[in-house]
Amino acid sequence: MDVKQIYKDYEELKNQNISITGRVRSNRVGKAVSFITLNDGTSINDLQIVYKETISNFESAKLARVSSIVEITGQIIVTPDKPQPFEIAASNIVLLDQAVEDYPLQKKEHSLEFLREIAQLRARTKTFSAIFRIRSAAAFAIHSFFQKRNFVYVNTPIITSNDAEGAGEIFAVVTENNEHKLTSDFFDKKANLTVSGQLNGEAFAQAFRKIYTFGPTFRAENSNTSKHAAEFWMIEPEVAFADLDEIILLIKDMLKFIMSYLLDNYIDEINFLTEQNNKELLSRLKSIVDTDFATITYSDAVGLLQNAIKNGHNFEDNDITFGTDLKTEHERYLCEEILKQPVFVTNYPGDIKAFYMKQNSDGKTVAAVDMLVPGIGELIGGSQREDDYQKLMERSKKFNINTNDLEWYLELRKFGYYKSSGFGLGFERLVMYLTGTQNIRDVIPYPRTPKNLLF
Ligand code: 4AD
Ligand code: MG
């Protein structure tokens, strides 16, 4: 029997005897009765154990310290007038393993900053139990969504020679010989960790029409912010024959599916995080299910931000004109203050977006979309891909891309390539949004950020 199941079936299990093994969260020894709060890992909820002097092994039970492992045998008692719906009246408590006295998690609540320093233990807290369970469930929901729609899951390479985004924020891959000398002999060319599986994914979309990737991604962005990690997970769907509007629709359907799945299956975790992390979380998740989201062009976004400045709003960076790469403060102000909802911004200037994006007929903008959400800013980046070989070549050269190495990708345009569109969803940013967490370091089990490679 596990705690998850007991919470589900306690009414039928009423007055039955059960046996359960778990970790002690607290042990309060009283004169008449004593209490153990037990967590067995299967649920965000704890079991309340009540025990008296008369039980077997009382002497060792009362010594069980925080984080010790015990096996409890007892009866399920339904307790309608207490905070928890039921408790276990123990008849026997076996101390299976005693923990040391200075176990680091002694308090009921610790700061997220403190817990980051003990990432090997933090998943045992209620907050991280909720966050990482939702992370797992969101991954499952994403796979379900795409599998149900007949998308093929593709594992694109982690070691590659391309910098798909052309931003030069790559980690090199080298080998180390016996003398600790680093060389790039292994592949006999420059190699790096992938920043995006998109280019390989596009080739597969030409074969399967609808594909998605879901894998680790690496960026050596030297920015110590609350939403950048050096190692993060990305979901990249790619749909052949689809244009930008179809991709925006796909994003909406995907987000609604994920929210509904979590609200149906993980309401305990959401309620807990709403109380603990972010008071607006539950209503935010519910609203996504029914909303249509706002869509504006980049030009309009710039106009709205200029207006805000005119009306007295002060950004750290007030220099916003057509061509400005919007910063997080601008993105957040747009969706939090001006539009008050998640927003799709389309048709960015070509100069500030990646080489592969389709040039619009205005000669200035590309068919790009960023989805901005309150609390974070950019959650998703996507585009329709340039389908004209010549134009793609020209743009690649303009961005100093090594076209020889990428010919396999560029020439896909010659072999029947009508349209193709896709997007990248940063999985950690999604989990931040789904859990109301403010720092990316708290939604990935072991975060990798500049000057930080512990665990
Ligand atoms: O906007 P990006 O750079 O787009 C791409 O990589 C395209 N190849 C996607 C595509 O069209 N297939 O990255 C996509 C998303 C961002 O919107 C953001 O959510 C996330 O990846 N992301 C990061 N997340 C955490 N840490 C970082 N350093 C991130 N960089 C990007
Ligand atoms: Mg982007």
Image (tube, helix red, strand yellow):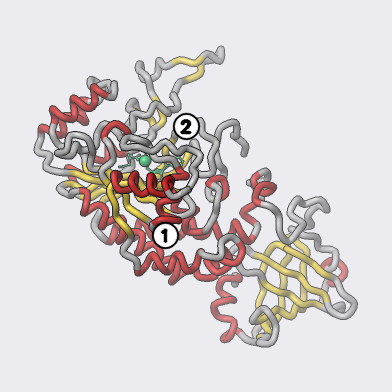
Q: To which quarter of the image does residue 356 belong?
A: top left
Query: Residue 322: image x %, image y %?
Result: 31, 37
Residue 165 in sight here: yes
Instruction: State the residue in front, 373 or 140.
Output: 373
Badge 1 vs badge 2, beta-carbon distance below 8 Å: no
Determine if the C-beta at disc 2 is less than 8 A from ligand 1. Answer: yes
Say which element carries label 1: loop
Q: To which quarter of the image does residue 206 belong?
A: top left
Q: Quadrant of the C terminus?
A: top right
Q: Amino acid at mark 2?
A: Glu
Asked whether, in this view, residue 100 is left or right of residue 451, the answer is: right
Query: Residue 278: image x %, image y %?
Result: 56, 61
Q: Amino acid at mark 1?
A: Lys
Determine if the C-beta at disc 1 is less than 8 A from ligand 1. Answer: no
**Ligand 2 falls in quadrant:** top left
Q: Mark 2 highlights which residue?
A: 221
Q: Is residue 258 above or below residue 410?
A: below
Mark in the foreground, 1 or 2: 1
Give the alpha-carbon distance from disc 1 to disc 2, as whole Å.
Answer: 29 Å
Asked whether, in this view, residue 9 is left or right of residue 217, the answer is: right
Q: Earlier in the sequence, mark 1 or mark 2?
A: 2
Residue 62: mark in rendering: none
Say which element carries label 2: loop
Q: Quadrant of the N terminus?
A: bottom right
Taking the spot 67% from the left edge, 49% from the top edge, the residue there is 115
Q: Mark 1 highlights which residue?
A: 340
Q: Is residue 147 above or below residue 165?
A: below
Asked whether, in this view, residue 393 is left or right of residue 101, the answer is: left
Residue 43 in sight here: no
Q: In the image as oriented, which residue stretches furthest toward the right?
A: 31
Q: In the image as oriented, which residue stretches furthest toward the front?
A: 311
Taking the spot 32% from the left edge, 52% from the top edge, the residue there is 344
